[in-house]
Amino acid sequence: MSALKREIVETIAHDGPMTLERFMSLCLTHPRYGYYMTRDPFGAGGDFVTAPEISQMFGELLGVWVTEAWRATGAPTEARLVELGPGRGTLMSDVLRVTPIAPNFFSAVTVHLVETSPVLREAQRQTLARAAKPAQWHLDFAETPPGPAFILANEFFDALPVRHFVKTAGGWREQLVGLDAQGELAFGLSDQIEPTLNVPAREGSIIEVSAVSQKLIGDIATRLVAQGGALLLIDYGYEQTSLGESLQAVSRHAYVDPLAAPGNADLTAHVDFAALARAARARGAKVMGPVTQAQFLLQLGIERRAETLSKKATPEQAQSIIEVSAVSQKLIGDIAARLVAQGGALLLIDYGYEQTSLGESLQAVSRHAYVDPLATPGEADLTAHVDFAALARAARARGAKVMGPVTQAQFLLQLGIERRAETLSKKATPEQAQSIIDAFERLTGVDDARRQMGQLFKVMAVTHPDMPDLPGFFV
């Protein structure tokens, strides 16, 4: 048992169950054992990859946006450039690379990084050591000096704690973290009915609320109204407030049990953009969006920037490609919206990636052979590998529940394909039995990716948020 888990277990044993909000806060920011306080979780060697780590283009375009926001605010001669949760400092480094194109902006701003992690502060110092602008660090946004503020928050709000409320026969009860009969961490419900919630819903429904996020964006909005500036918030989440919960734990690029290893996995929840917009407008601020990241970056000119960089790049650098299917994401978003409104489930089986990554997978196939995609339009099948992570984000953004992805092998084996193959083989001729064995190995095999489908093909389900876990996706 880790030191943090032991401390949490002892606290619950002494004081009783704690809210999910407090549990998340301890897991992520405990002074000695918190996830962000003890490690650098970013990149391929960490637990997840963020957009600034994928390409400099992301940060450079945000730098362009910031300078335009500054001009639109009246080009104040003194202003603050602030980043919340700056990661390794990569985003700010890329922003500062392009902002000298607006020299008056560059001379007007001071740079401020809001970071609680000593490990990440040191990484940021190293990244920004040669930056043209010195940075100042703060533990809290409230510590940043007054004045017009231009604030960047990329994948920051998803890491702020949430609370869950479950609809029971008597009303809404808060979900708490307590101990089971064996002394292990387990979810339970408060004995008290939450008097402020009167949302109509089916029994078992869940409402996810981040009071911390709403308070922070309210405080930021108040400052922007009083002193000027703008906040740019980029994160994964929902356009509309809806029922359901999105708590997830990620370790080494894989989903894990949120209660299993406190302090050793990243805990996040999808951002409720509608709730944040309401909180900001309540303080008198103007809200634009939300729009998709694709729409935002394309409108800022990421295609032209990619072309410019490619012309100056080595062949290896030029091959850094991002593959996006806006059509797929729109379709699964439309399906998810229907499932949330009317019920049902989508089962998606295809070959592709569990995690979004650089690279391209376009291929053309004709007569069981790969051919040039441009050679004979209309005479070859054109396909690309499915980005399951992108589809999952699009579905969750509409309030749907997502199960998986899991490998096709895991899915079919859990459904009982071995037993079915045995049953069919008993009734088959020797030739038929061998065909059944060959088919079983092709569908579930993982050793030969060219011939076997078990590993390359993935399976994902999208359902109404109240749907229980379905066969094939049991842990």
Image (cartoon, grey):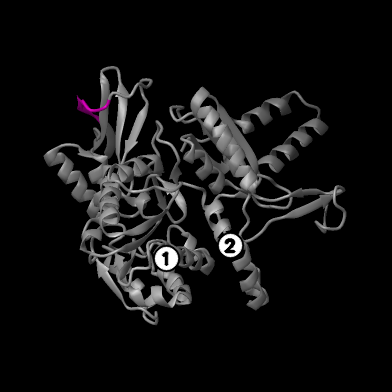
Residue at image mark 1: 71
Identify which residue is drawn at 68% across, 25% down: 423
Q: Of the residues shown, which amino acid type is indicated by label 2? A: Gly
Q: Secondary structure at mark 1?
A: helix
Q: Secondary structure at mark 2?
A: loop
Residue at image mark 2: 301
Is residue 331 positioned above or below 266 on the image? above
- Magenta span of residues: 189-197
- Residue 192 x/y as whole percent: 19, 26
- Residue 65 x/y as whole percent: 46, 63
Identify which residue is drawn at 39% across, 69% down: 89
Identify which residue is drawn at 46% across, 75% down: 97
Disc on the earlier residue, 1 or 2: 1
Q: Residue furthest front?
A: 74
Q: Name the quadrant containing residue 167.
A: top left
Magenta region includes residue 196: yes
